[in-house]
Amino acid sequence: MPADEFRQYGHQMIDWIADFLDNAGDIPAFPDVQPGDIRGKLPSSPPITGEAMEQILADVDRVIMDYGIPLGRRFRALKLWFTLRYFGVEGIASRIREHLRLAAKFAGLIDAHPEFERLAPIPLSTICFRAHPQGLDDDEALNALNERLLRAINQTGEAFLSHTRLDGRFTIRLVISHLRTNEAHINRVWELAQEKLNQAF
């Protein structure tokens, strides 16, 4: 979604929330709703292809406005509902497939490099790896090296990688999950990992 459209729909949602607050006194504290009423007003399954934002917002107004948002817990389902409606099943599936492709590509780069190693399989889009320069086999030294490497990559501000420990080994994690992550981003992370290894080692 282009920035101008996002801004337009964001303003509409803010207006909707403000109207809700202005008129909260007119909304029954205990709506006359029976089990299944809200479900009956929404599609029984997510669309195959994405829907127009106008249609999604119309459903917010038609369904949620009348019944309110539960205050006793986070309205977790709303985020998923918006995502499914906006992208559709095919849109979400294509993004997941692309994230898996990018993860496999990054894993292949690690596997082919003599000074890096992958530390776990990649069934999804999280790649666990570390630098392992030839001739350096001391676990404590490798852990310290990879801590420095992670810090150096993150300090560039171009990427943010996380870490964990697998069998006591300091492990760098690249997670591919952002909607706009593309191959150029993955390639840049790989360039940074190699550049910063040379500086950290």
Image (cartoon, grey):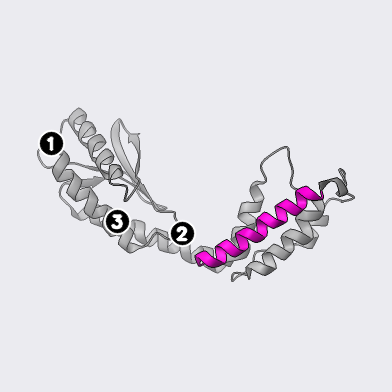
Question: Residue sitting at 14 percent across and 45 percent down?
Answer: 198
Provide the secondary structure element on which disc 2 rests.
loop
Q: Which residue is mark 2?
A: 179
On the image, the x and y values in percent for residue 40 come to 80, 60
Which region is colored magenta? 1-23
* Visible residue check, residue 43: no
Q: Is residue 136 left or right of residue 186?
A: left
* Visible residue check, residue 8: yes
Please identify the quarter of the rendering in which residue 64 is found: bottom right
Mark in the foreground, 1 or 2: 2
* Type of amino acid under label 1: Leu
Distance from the alpha carbon under mark 2 to that under mark 3: 17 Å
Secondary structure predominantly adopted by residues drawn in magenta: helix
Q: Which residue is mark 3?
A: 106
Please say if the residues under marks 2 and 3 sit with CB atoms less than 8 Å apart. Answer: no
Distance from the alpha carbon under mark 3 to that under mark 1: 23 Å
Q: Quadrant of the C terminus?
A: top left
Label 1 or label 2, whichever comes before in sequence order:
1
Question: Residue sitting at 39 percent across and 59 percent down?
Answer: 181
On the image, the x and y values in percent for residue 12 come to 66, 61
Q: Which residue is mark 1?
A: 136
Please identify the quarter of the rendering in which residue 128 is found: top left
* Type of amino acid under label 3: Phe
Q: Is residue 108 above or below residue 55?
A: above
Q: Is residue 108 left or right of residue 101?
A: left
Provide the secondary structure element on which disc 1 rests.
loop
Distance from the alpha carbon under mark 1 to that under mark 2: 37 Å
Pick out the residue farthest to the left.
135
On the image, the x and y values in percent for residue 134 come to 11, 42
Mark in the foreground, 2 or 3: 2
Label 3 or label 1, whichever comes before in sequence order:
3
